[in-house]
Amino acid sequence: MTAMNDTQLSDYVTFTTAGQMFGLPIECVQDVFKPSRITRVPLAGPDIAGVLNLRGRIVTAIELRSRLGLDARDEGQVPMAIGIESRGESFGLLVDAVGEVLKLPDDEREPNPINLDRNLGRVAAGVYRLDGHLLVVLDIDRVLDLSPEAAAA
Amino acid sequence: MDDLLREFLTETNESLNLVDAELVRFEQEPNNGAILGNIFRLVHTIKGTCGFLALPRLETLTHAAETLMGKFRDGMPVTAEAVTLILSTIDRIKLILDAIEKSEQEPSGGDADLIDPLGRMARQEAAAPPPAPVEIEPDKPEPIEKPEKQEKAAAERPEEDRGDRLANHSIRVNVDTLDHLMTTVSELVLTRNQLLEIVRRNEDSDFKVPLQRLSSVTAELQEGVMKTRMQPIGNAWQKLPRVVRDLCAELGKDIELAMRGADTELDRQVLDLVKDPLTHLVRNCADHGIEAPAARIAAGKPAKGTIRLSAWHEGGHIIIEISDDGRGLDLAGIKAKVVEKGLASEAQLAAKSEAEICNYIFAPGFTTAAKVTSISGRGVGMDVVRSNIEQIGGTVDLKSLSGAGTTFTIKIPLTLAIVSALIVEAGGERFAIPQLAVLELVRAGNNGEHRIEHIKDAPVLRLRNKLLPLVRLKEVFRLGACDNENGFVVVTQVGSQVFGIVVDGVFHTEEIVIKPMSSKLRHIPVFSGTTILGDGAVIMIIDPNGVAQALGRAAVAATRAENSELQSREEEADEDTVSLLVFRAGSQQPKAVPLSLVTRLEEIDCRKIEISDGRHLVQYRDQLMPLLRIDAETSLKKEGAQPILVFSDQGRSMGLVADEIIDIVEERLDIEVSSDRPGLLGYAVIKGATTEIIDVGHFLPQAFEDWFRRRDLPAARRARNVLLVDDSAFFRELLAPLIKAAGYRVVAAASAADALAALKSDTRFDLIVTDIEMPEMDGFALAEAVRAMPAAAAVPIIALATMVSAETVERGRAAGFHDFVAKFDRAGLVAAIKEQGADLNRAA
């Protein structure tokens, strides 16, 4: 603690999807759960995996792979969900696997590289260089903004 | 104690408590309009109610206070004496109320000591000092201090019994609190259901007995909570007798309001929402429905009109019926208004049933009252009535019998939080359909009594003596192909429209708790919410209104080409079919006109046909209708019935004489040979026979010389794709075949806005032909907008003008028109199209 007294630290919940490591600020994560019995919603966009019941709450499941323009998950690969509370509604972000919580200094976060994939650049809020891999920090508001304009941008 | 009196006391006491707080501020800021307004309203309300409840003493007192406060509101300066006087008056009101609560009667005595100074002050005689009640201190926390001139009854009233006050027997709870309680109980019910499910699977569970107890307690709790929100519908009716009485006085009518089923209970929230629509409907009945006494007697009815209000429970819903024995709806007036407002064309109206036409009164801004009265006729109302009722998941319907009266039927759920729903399955998913909309269930199969049949691609079901349009849920939801004709048909009603929803399976009905939909899903019109079933699964609640819209789209695409102008663009030529009426007139060769142009087919008794000035005329619907012959070979019959094709627009009709109506066919209108013969667009092969396609446009000017001058005609041009813009469906349909005959594909748009949308979605237009005079956005504005669109800026535009003046041409050139064609100059239009098309070919 003493060694880092002049730098702000933030906690990130980390997870992987399609081999890439992502992080979300811990404040915006409500819980982590294994989604079950997702009900598909006809006519909803491809980013909406469906709706499910989490302890009496109705949660809208968002497929991160689709949001990032990635291929669908392999058959049989069970997703995990990051529970998010936004503007009074509950969402579940479907990811491949959930990792640990990391404490990272704010001043080491770097801006998105300019050649970042457009789909990813739209929702990324910076990158951390960790040992052996990169961690992309997601902006949860932008991840949840499914409006057609945002999708077309 | 009388319910009305009880409610009056509860409400007034509550309001007075509120005003107590305001009084202190009132003294400090006697000129604060808001505070004054609050007190004024309260006094006004009390006054109004007193008249009702026969409380003359309170009424007189509040009337005097109201008069003075009205002066203040009008700007008279508020003096300290005046404040004191008003405060004394309010205290006096409280005393009288207390006495009423005890004895259910107004205490005897008078209030001249207050009324006189109030009156004097109101008459600007404030100089006279107000009488004694000076020791009343407005900021005393308790209104215990009485004016010195105490009424006996009030004076004797012991203060200690306040705890027993009736007003305290009920407490007012914020609806939000009750709502929250309701939600929590709903959750509890769901959790219990889940537990029961688990225990059912584990026979020997120790939980069985306690769970049974939990189950019954939960049910009791649910019922209790529901009950806290239930109120008799009569509460929403209380003000109506007064409303009717006032209206009678104002309109010089004699109306009796009969109420039945006032004790029918429903959810408070629903009750609140239904109050205003009910008042509006009753006002409407009194104003529009019931005739003046003289007219009633003339019509052989009793002078006194009756408005009946009834309410009853029916299968989980409450039905409220408001009926009058008045004149019924003015169908002709409604039709005229519909056409005038451009909601539908005459031809479309002719195809509608009376019930459907009546339903137009619910369209926004619709009113048929010739004069605007203070009661109704402002054009706001019926649409609000409907949307208010639909908001709470209800429906409103009406029946009208000319001369015998009108009946409005409102069907609403008992509660908003829990509805009964039918759980169905389609494409492997379950959905809930609110029971309110469901009329019946029919099993459809190839072997059974009911078989799904098709008219072209549109699925239909013969149900008793009706043809029911069907919509397949799987198709609407794009859940895969419908591979067989077996399934269940959920017969659904939305407004006056009845249709069938085809589903794969039907499970059961369940009381579901409606949960709001995720903001990410709200744009899907076919869903109204989500719910959690007893087994814990989340399913979507279907909005029958949304499905009806989907049905409309499908129906238009499949069968009603006339409404699909913009859609026709999407369809390739081989799907471009038109309903044609095939008939014979004169020669043996069959003739055809687009069915959508024909308003009606009539057979007219030959003896009724008159000849005037060499023209054949017939009395038709109170008008003289000219009859035209297609050519000299056609002759009118000498006797019997003469078949006539009636064409109407803008309230005028013309009849085309036919020998025989042969058939109505769905055909791709492919005019193969253009004709120079007047009145003939060309020839097409229909059902294997070469058929003359009749140009109705040729005959209209013969019937009425000014027919074309009354409406702008769209022009067509030579290009592969022509966008035809005209607000009149009649002229769109008239010109489209003409342009088509000249060799172009036509997309018609009913307004400039539609045209711009079409241009935006698709830039393949080679030419635009537009009417100049159109509501909202005229041809000039459209041309300017098109010029501003990068993709469409180069598209030539031909304008159709009733009158071509130098000034119009100048303005048109500035706006970007390439050519002007007079509306009735059809040859000129084709020439202009060809010319512009030639330019285009060069450019290409």
Image: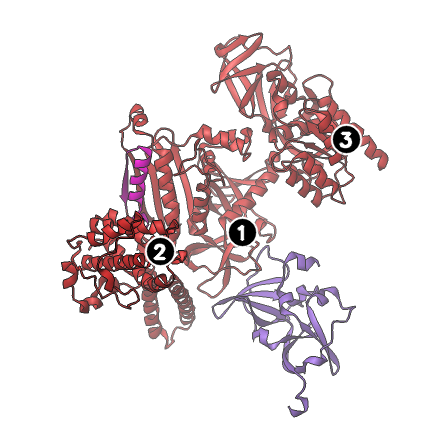
**Amino acid type at mark 3:** Arg
The tint of chain A in the picture is purple
Please report contact status of discs 1 and 3: CB closer than 8 Å, yes or no. Answer: no
Q: Quadrant of residue B247?
A: top left
Q: Position of residue B243 (x, y in %)?
A: 32, 42
B213 lies left or right of B524: left
| Residue B254 is one of the magenta-drawn residues | yes
In the rendered structure, which segment of residues is drawn in magenta? B233-260
**Amino acid type at mark 1:** Val
The chain shown in red is which?
B
Q: Chain of mark 3?
A: B
Which residue carries the number 2 mark?
A: B78
B107 lies left or right of A64: left
Q: Residues within 10 Å of mark 3 (few under 14, many from 20)?
A: many
Evaluate whether label 1 is on the same chain as label 3: yes
Q: Chain of mark 1?
A: B
